[in-house]
Image (cartoon, rainbow, N blue to C red):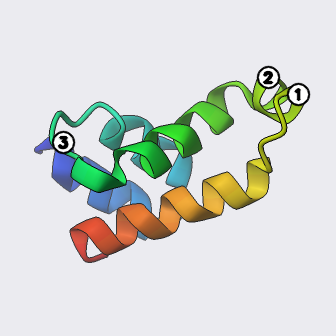
């Protein structure tokens, strides 16, 4: 199973944490890189990002939406 297939499967089952974790390591995310990696980092380090003023829920929602739009999920 390819990494993209793993992302699709995780996304389809609602496991956005794993989908973002895998996708954040893709080398060619283009303009979507910031939203996807920030969402992944918010899952990993929510207290830090909350301290620096990031709305965790919004960042994750934006990352999930961006991931879905990028790969057509």
Q: List the residue tagged with mark 1.
A: 51
Looking at the image, is mark 3 or mark 2 nearer the viewer? Answer: 2
- Mark 1 burial class by Cα count in 10 Å: few <14, some 14-19, many 20+: few
Q: Is residue 8 left or right of residue 5?
A: right
Q: Quadrant of the N terminus?
A: top left
Asked whether 9 or 43 is in front, the reply is 43
Q: Secondary structure at mark 2?
A: helix
Q: Where 38 sits versus 51, above or below?
A: below
- Mark 2 burial class by Cα count in 10 Å: few <14, some 14-19, many 20+: few
Q: Percent x, y for residue 24?
A: 36, 37
Q: Quadrant of the C terminus?
A: bottom left
Q: Secondary structure at mark 1?
A: helix
Q: Where 65 sits versus 30, above or below?
A: below
Q: Percent x, y for residue 41?
A: 58, 31
Q: List the residue tagged with mark 2.
A: 48
Total tally of numbered discs in the picture:
3
- Contact between marks 3 and 2 (CB within 8 A): the answer is no
At 18% from the left and 42% from the top, the residue drawn is: 3
Q: Is residue 67 left or right of residue 64?
A: left
Looking at the image, is mark 3 or mark 1 nearer the viewer? Answer: 1
Q: Secondary structure at mark 3?
A: helix
Q: Is residue 33 left or right of residue 47?
A: left
At 44% from the left and 44% from the top, the residue drawn is: 34
Q: Based on the displayed image, in which of its 4 quarters is residue 48 positioned?
A: top right
At 37% from the left and 70% from the top, the residue drawn is: 68
Q: Where 47 sits versus 61, above or below?
A: above
Q: Percent x, y for residue 4?
A: 18, 51
Numbered mark located on residue 3 in the image: 3
At 50% from the left and 62% from the top, the residue drawn is: 64
Q: Based on the displayed image, in which of its 4 quarters is residue 44 positioned?
A: top right
């Amino acid at each position: 199973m390819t990494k993209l297939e793993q992302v699709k499967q995780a996304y389809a089952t609602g496991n956005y944490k794993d989908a973002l974790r895998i996708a954040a390591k893709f080398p060619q995310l283009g303009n979507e890189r910031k939203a996807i990696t920030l969402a992944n980092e918010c899952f990993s380090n929510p207290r830090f990002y909350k301290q620096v003023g990031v709305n965790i829920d919004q960042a994750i929602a934006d990352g999930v939406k961006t991931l879905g739009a990028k790969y057509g999920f």
